[in-house]
Image (cartoon, rainbow, N blue to C red):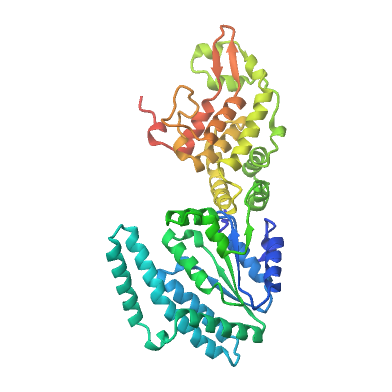
Amino acid sequence: MEYKNYLPLTDIENDKLNFKELSIEIAAFINAFPSDIPFSISLNGSWGSGKSTMLNFIEKNLDEKCKVIRFNPWLITSKEDLILSIFEEMNEQIASLTTSKSSKIKEKLKSYSRKFMPTFVKGLTYYESMKYNMDPSLTGAIAEETFKLTESLVKEKEFDKPLSVQKKELADELKKVLSDANKKIVIFIDELDRLFPDEIITVFQMVKAILDFPGVLFVVAMDDEVVKNALSKKGIQNPADYLEKIFQKNYNLSSKYQIRTLTKSYIYPRLDLDDECHVLLKKCLDAYIMGNYGLQIKDFTHDQELVIENCETKEDRAANWKLHQKTLDRGASLMRSYQELFREFSRSLNLDNPRRFNKFANYLLENWPKIYNRIFKEIKKKDLYIYCTFILLVTNYFFPESISVYFSDTNYNEPGEEPGFIVSVKAHLYSIFPEYISENNNILKTTNFIRVCCREIVSYPDQNKLFY
């Protein structure tokens, strides 16, 4: 099986989700932005929505005036190293300008970072001590000693001038250098939402330390909801206002309403339509993900083979069964159950998210042939059996604890409230499996296949062997 990886895309030509247009728009804004003004942009999206891919596409569209720094704080192990690392990256880009002033500004940048470090570490120490409810006087003393220790590790000459003076001098020099070279520094920060709350605070402190520098533009990719929760946990009362003070422009990557596009892009090209197994998988995808459920709904007709498969006694097999009237009247409810299950694929499973969908696609393409060949080696391929197998295989991926031989038993309920997706799955399966009634008014449910399918999917040893 061809296995799709989860790595961000780098080639715009491989774009499947219309990222190209937005990346061009953002890059055009950055290209046109004055090189003597600081600016910051947030690129907001949930985990797996494609933020790293979008950053790659933006970088591809930036012109030669932009000196790009790709900064991933998740790869840096200590808070102190975050500050030093970003200044080292800036020094590297300034050195590449090879102007007469670049060496001078490198020294100022190094001096500023060293000057900034003790104050930064002092603040972190104070904050960490307060977090553990230490005595305020003791907290202050510890922070002060930490400041002195850090200060002693830095050259004396770095403390000849106040931090504010050094920052202004550095800003003036940076403005001249970037203006003379007609360049700007664009800093991409990625993976912010992977950090612990303390580390997220550290990154924003770092951004604020550089934010006033002219010609420096930040693009920060993050899950803004995760970041807001982290800020809230750290005592910031209004995280939205806090972020608004940092970012002047926001772009949002929505991962809603693209499940059909993802299916066409990540599953359909990998199907071998000369293989019946894949043909039937596509039929299921058409029905439950593409939303073409109307094509699958047909009038119920008597199926004697289905009746026999679900009769447990000789007397039942000899009885005269006919379709129950409520099955014959099930057309509207069957349509509703298709519609509800289709909605649940997006609403409950979050399959509109590209990374989550890619993982799901790999699971489906790997496991569908195996379960298909096991089940239908001896069982006839009825449409409702094919659909049932697909639905239960999907259910097993997202809710493995729900799959058991009791899945179709209305008299057996697992403890706790069932997820909405499971409720919709059961309602749909009860709709597609017909009921029969005998002349003695006995009711025959035809859901034995559900038990067979669940047993094959989970392969419980005790349920795959006869002990009686």
- At 51% from the left and 62% from the top, the residue drawn is 191
Given residues 168 and 31, the one toward you in this image is 168
> Quarter-wise, where is residue 150 in the image?
bottom left
Residue 238 image position (x, y, % from top left): 51, 54
Given residues 203 and 22, the one toward you in this image is 203
Image quadrant where one finds the C terminus: top left
Residue 372 image position (x, y, % from top left): 56, 39
- At 59% from the left and 29% from the top, the residue drawn is 428
Residue furthest front in the image: 137
- At 55% from the left and 14% from the top, the residue drawn is 443
Q: Is residue 223 visible?
A: no
- Quick check: 261 left or right of 128? right
Residue 401 image position (x, y, % from top left): 44, 38
- Quick check: 46 left or right of 181? left
> Vertical placement of 6 versus 183: above or below?
above
Residue furthest top in the image: 440
Number of numbered discs present? 0
> Vertical placement of 406 versus 22: above or below?
above
Given residues 274 and 83, the one toward you in this image is 83
Residue 325 image position (x, y, % from top left): 65, 14
Given residues 238 and 216, the one toward you in this image is 238
Q: Is residue 312 visible?
A: yes
- Quick check: 137 left or right of 70? left
> Quarter-wise, where is residue 137 in the image?
bottom left
